[in-house]
Amino acid sequence: MFTTADFRNGLKIEFEGDPYVIVYFQHVKPGKGGAFVRTKLKNLKTGAVLEHTFRSGDKVDKPDLEDRDMQFMYRMENAYHFMDTATYEQIYLGGDHVGDAGNYLIENLPVKILFYRGEPIGIDLPIFIELRIIETEPGVRGDTVSGGSKPANLESGAVVQVPLFLNVGDKIKVDTRTGTYIERA
């Protein structure tokens, strides 16, 4: 069990029967009355964010969460198929579980899948991945690194803004948290 003294950003707790992660917390000690902790909690199953105030000393449960190393296999319609790298067991997740991460999935990409009570509820991508540009406008002589940018379609299906000097076939490093170009790979 966790007490309010254990609260920190990123802590995963079980609240009202669902797994939550603490997005923000503030310990408040008013001049009159008892101390309390204001929190913003994000539901790990639905993504909904709620605000809740805990009295100082309240206890919450630890959720039954497990991270498993998996590998993305393929996408079929709105289902994403993954293989456990330890047991070779295959699972599939629907588009609602994968969310925006589906824009960066390519075959054989290692990912972590979060399980709650044995049921997959979310996916955690590597922070940086390398993807090949499959479609973009051609670069023009005189384009520089400090110049403008242009949209580029990547092999995973994502579209990112890249510098003008990049062409079709170039590999780039992309930040999966923000969906932005980092550097040429």
Image: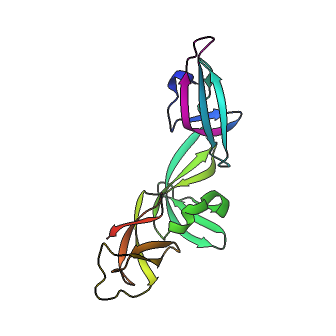
Q: Position of residue 182 (x, y in %)?
A: 36, 65
Taking depth in this image into account, of 164 and 120 the one nearest to the observer is 164
Asked if residue 172 lies left or right of residue 5, the reply is left
* Figure colour scheme: rainbow
Asked if residue 100 lies left or right of residue 173, the reply is right
Asked if residue 112 lies left or right of residue 44, the reply is left
Q: At 52% from the left edge and 28% from the top edge, which residue is drawn?
A: 7
Above/below status of 170 relative to 178: below
Taking depth in this image into account, of 48 and 161 the one nearest to the observer is 161
Q: At 48% from the left edge and 71% from the top edge, which residue is drawn?
A: 107
Asked if residue 82 lies left or right of residue 19, the reply is left
Q: At 62% from the left edge and 45% from the top edge, which residue is drawn?
A: 44
Q: At 56% from the left edge and 65% from the top edge, which residue is drawn?
A: 102
Residue 58 among magenta residues: no
Q: Position of residue 125 (x, y in %)?
A: 48, 57
Q: Position of residue 36 (x, y in %)?
A: 60, 20
For residue 154, say whether it is visible.
no
Q: Quadrant of residue 150?
A: bottom left
Taking depth in this image into account, of 121 and 26 the one nearest to the observer is 26
The C terminus is located in which quarter? bottom left
Q: Residue furthest right?
A: 16
Above/below status of 23 relative to 95: above
Q: Position of residue 9 (x, y in %)?
A: 50, 36
For residue 19, say whether it is visible.
yes
Taking depth in this image into account, of 30 and 123 the one nearest to the observer is 30
The N terminus is located in which quarter? top right
Question: Total number of numbered labels?
Answer: 0
Residue 25 among magenta residues: yes
The magenta stretch is: 19-35
Q: Quadrant of residue 139?
A: bottom left
